[in-house]
Structures are given as C-alpha cells and as structure tokens.
Image (cartoon, rainbow, N blue to C red):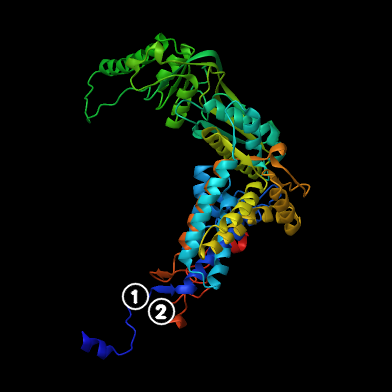
Amino acid sequence: MAQQRQRMGNQPMIVLSEESQRTSGEDAQSMNITAGKAVSEAVRTTLGPKGMDKMLVDSTGGVVVTNDGVTILKEMDIDHPAANMIVEVSETQEDEVGDGTTTAVVIAGELLDQAEDLLDSDVHATTIAQGYRQAAAKAKEVLEENAIDVGTEDRETLRKIAATAMTGKGAESSKDLLSELVVDAVLAVADEEGIDTDNVSVEKVVGGAVDNSELVEGVIVDKERVDENMPYGVEDANVALYDGALEVKETEIDAEVNVTDPDQLQQFLDQEEKQLREMVDQIESVGADVVFVDGGIDDMAQHYLSKAGILAVRRVSSSDMGALARATGARVVGNLDDLTEDDLGFAGSVAQKDIGGDERIFVEDVEEAKSVTMILRGGTEHVVDEVERAIDDSLGVVRTTLEDGKVMAGGGAPETELALQLRDFADSVGGREQLAVEAFAEALEVIPRTLAENAGLDPIDSLVDLRSRHDGGELAAGLDAYTGEVIDMDEEGVVEPLRVKTQAIESATEAAVMILRIDDVIAAGDLKGGGTDDDEGGDMPPGGGGMGGMGGMGGMGGAM
C-alpha cells in the first residue's frame, strides 16, 4: 500500500465518472442559496392584496394567468434540485392548509438570504441551522399564545377568513358573495369524521359574471337522461343507486349455440327481454323514481324505464356515485335483487337543466346535503380558472379554522410581532446561534416589507410604524395595503387560521436548513446548463449556473 502511494505521488485519485459534475464547499452553498432565492423572488411580487399576477405559457402555448404561489411554481417547470426544495415548501403548505403558499416561499428565500450574510461572516452552516430551529420553535410558541379561539357558530369570523384568502386574487371583486358560499359549503359537508372539502364539487361555467356564482345543496352530474321519453324532472324523488349495468349478463365462458329454428332465436330474444323486464320491475317495485347506474342501460331496459316514468342516468362515475350517496342518503347497491326501499335516497328535485350550454342532471333540495356543488361563473375561461383557485384556497382555510379553532390577525401583524419577540429571545440564546435567531427575526419582516412594496408604499416607513405600534403592545396592528396606514387587523376583519402561519414557518425553516447543510453537490451525468468542456470534470460554477441553474426553470425566461 505504501509503495502504491509512492507511485501515485501527488496525483489526485479520480473516483467519479467523466460525465459527473461536482461542486463543493462555498461554491455548492452559494449555488443552492442562489437557486432558492431565485424561486422566492419569482413569486414575491404576487404577495398581498396589491400583488401582481403572472402569465405562464407552456410549451404547447397554453396560458395560465394567476397569482397563486403554488400554481406559479408548478407551472414554471423548475429543474434545479435545490430550487425544487423550495417548491416543495409551497406544495406542503397547499396540502396542509390550502393558503399561504407565497408567504412560505418568500420566508424560505429570505432565510437563505440572511444565512448567506452569516456564512460570509464565518458563521458555520450547522450553527445557523441550530439557531434557525430554535427561532422557529419559539415563533410557533409565540403564535399559539397570541391566537384567538373561534367556534363553528362564529359564522362572521369564518366568512372573514374566507374573504381574506380571496383578497388579491381574481375573485376579490365578489369576495362578499363567494365567502358566504364557501362557508355554507364547508359547514354543509362537515360530519362526525371531520371535513373533507373533496365533497364540495366545483362546476366552472364560462359566461355571466362572478357575482352570478351559486351553491347547489346537492349534486350536479355531468350526464343526461338516457331516453327522450323519460321525464325531464321528478319532484320528491326516491333515488336508487346501482353499481352495475341494466344489461343482459354475458356468460363468463365462450359458448357457441347453433340455432336451427327461428322459434329458438325468438326464445333467446324473449328470454333477454324477460331478464331486462325483471330488472326494471325490481327498481319500480321498491318505489324508485330516479335511478343512477354505474354501467350501461340496454335499449329495451330504457324503453321499460320510460314506460314506468323513471328517470335513468347511465355510466355515472364512482366519485359522482359517492357524492349522490352522501347527498341523498341512498346506499349504492351492487345486486338489484338486494335493492329494498331502505336503500333509496331522497331529493326534493331531480331535473335535467341547461348550464352554460350543457345539459346536466341537478339533484337538489336534499334533507341534509353532505355533498354540495359550487357553480362558478366568469366572463372568460382564465377568469373562471383563477376564481376556482381562489375558492380552493378559501375552502382550505375555512376547513383548517374549523378543525383547529384558532385564528390570528393578518396584514403582516404576526410577522412583525414575531420579529419583535425573537429579537428579545435572541439575547437569551448563547453563542453564535444568537446571530442566527436575530437573522430569523429579520427574515420574517420580509412579509410586511413585501406587502408595502407591492402596494407602492415606502417599506421602511411602513416597518417603522408597525414596529412602534407592536412595541406599544398592539398585537393585531397590521398594514392596510389600500391606505398605507397601520390599523387593527382584527377590527378590519383581516384574519387567517393559525396553521397558515405555523406551517409556513415550519416548512420554510426546514427547507432553508436542509439547503444550508449541503456542502457538496455531485451530479451524475451532464445536467442542463452544467460545466463546459473546458471545466475538466464539469465542476459547476458558483452562483447557480450548474445543474440547470435557474436557466433550468422551464419557460421562466419567456413567461416571467
């Protein structure tokens, strides 16, 4: 072994393949921090009630106009692995809470920016990580201490929360109406098991104004009745749900039958007709006026159903079947012989109606709608899509509020209060971690600062005003983006669920810490935008050029 070392002399041993790229130490940290900050900057101008929108154009020419943080980051098709860690922050926020995605990403970017200054001052990345984690734990503690309790009966607070989530989005002009619809929808689908907002279906209709949107306490099935001779609508309907087909069952084995006599053929046809007749008789005998079928309905069965005055719908999806069962109280039956009167559901009205030029089946006036449908209208497809994204966020925050029962003021008030208390907390933290806690406090102020910038206000003046009001003990003092004044956000009705803030801080901290702790990036193969032939081994340049840099962000160059 000693001889081998001697022979190699001072030549470096190459263990990576020629195609691999490697960046180490400060270069790796700098590259990853730059990538994370670039993602944050991409969505920063969308924050707040005066936030701007982004137009994103994909490779096929499809256009999305939105200021929803998670939608922007998903559509941007980001390649850089460190940048993708920041995108995951927005996705986690969306899944957990439904709103606050831009806030989470902007905080993550600012934590990285503050960390960069500390790294330049020779504070070790592990020390920064420890300080950030201590600050995040303290921040969560402060937020929970200052949260306000809210109950299911406090409808006005729920409406304010729904409206706050829509502010700054395409739905803002009609937020009073839409927030009422959202609260009605969430309260309707709540049950003992909790709140599943998947039970709130959304139907988009291009045409009319956003103000024409409405909530149907029931289900809209995107189908038509199977036969023109069936009734258009049924009042006080008994509804049957059949998970099968009203068709003659085929044999499970291939069989060949030789028919030698026309009478034999007629017997076969009569037998099929008898089977179909018995199926319809079974549905009719239990008193069903409407039947939704998972499979097909034979022409002969359609004829008998029409004669019986039963409205039938075929090929209904399993998700619609589930929604119909929740709404009407019916049980989905897999075998018609088992169908009884107890399996039927009830709806005050089942009717085929025109909506936006399409005929659909409306199942309404149910006794206790555990599945509801929101009809969203708008002048163009882009408007309706953006309203749907706003409604999605709004449903999420109302659900979260009902689950946790805690809210807090918005408008930059929590972040200003946290920055104040974390600076005090930093004095009790020993060692260099103190610097990281102070940097964390500084980073949180990016939210009120960005709110001011996006509203065309002076961020320094706004921050000074906010700090002095919070120094005076006004916990709910936040920035009114419309007037530029610092006001009481609780009184103004700008409130958000506690979990929006705690989740944003948790996710942003974890992502920032993970990125900071990486000091070596080894990429197998030549990634987009990586080193050139002159690099000898393809070391990635600092500043984010390698591994796709931010140039790997799909259509960002053309779309942003």
Callout 2 crowding tier (Cα within 10 Å): few <14, some 14–19, many ≥20:
some
Is 467 or 194 nearer to us in this picture? 467
Q: Is residue 161 visible?
A: yes
Label 2 SS:
loop
At x 64%, y 57%, the residue is 446
Front residue of this view, candidates 490 and 215: 490
Q: Relative to 418, does residue 546 appear above or below in the rendering? A: below
Instruction: Tell which of 113 and 388 is nearer to you.
Output: 113
Q: Is residue 33 above or below residue 248?
A: below
Identify which amino acid the numbered label 1 is placed on: Leu
User: In which quadrant of the rendered view does residue 341 lie?
Assistant: top left
Camera-side residue of 394 and 142:
142
Residue 272 in picture, x, y percent from top left: 32, 18
Neighbourhood count class around disc 1 (C-alpha, 10 Å): few under 14, some 14–19, many 20 upward: few
Could you give the CA–CA distance between mark 2 and mark 1, rounded to whole angstroms?
Answer: 9 Å
Q: Within the image, what quadrant is residue 409 found in?
A: top right
Q: Quadrant of the N terminus?
A: bottom left
Is the Cβ of the residue at disc 2 closer than 8 Å to that at disc 1?
yes
Residue marked by disc 1: 16
Work out whether 125 lies above or below 490: below
Q: Amino acid at mark 2?
A: Gly
Q: Identify the element where label 1 is drawn.
A: loop
Question: In the figure, is residue 87 to the left or right of 485?
Answer: left
- Residue to which mark 2 is pinned: 537
Mark 2 vs mark 1: which is more N-terminal? 1
x and y, in percent, of residue 92 in the image = 49, 48
What residue is at 69 percent from the left and 49 percent from the top?
A: 470
- In the image, taking residue 537 as reference, residue 560 lies left or right, namely right
Q: State the residue at coordinates (73%, 59%).
A: 460
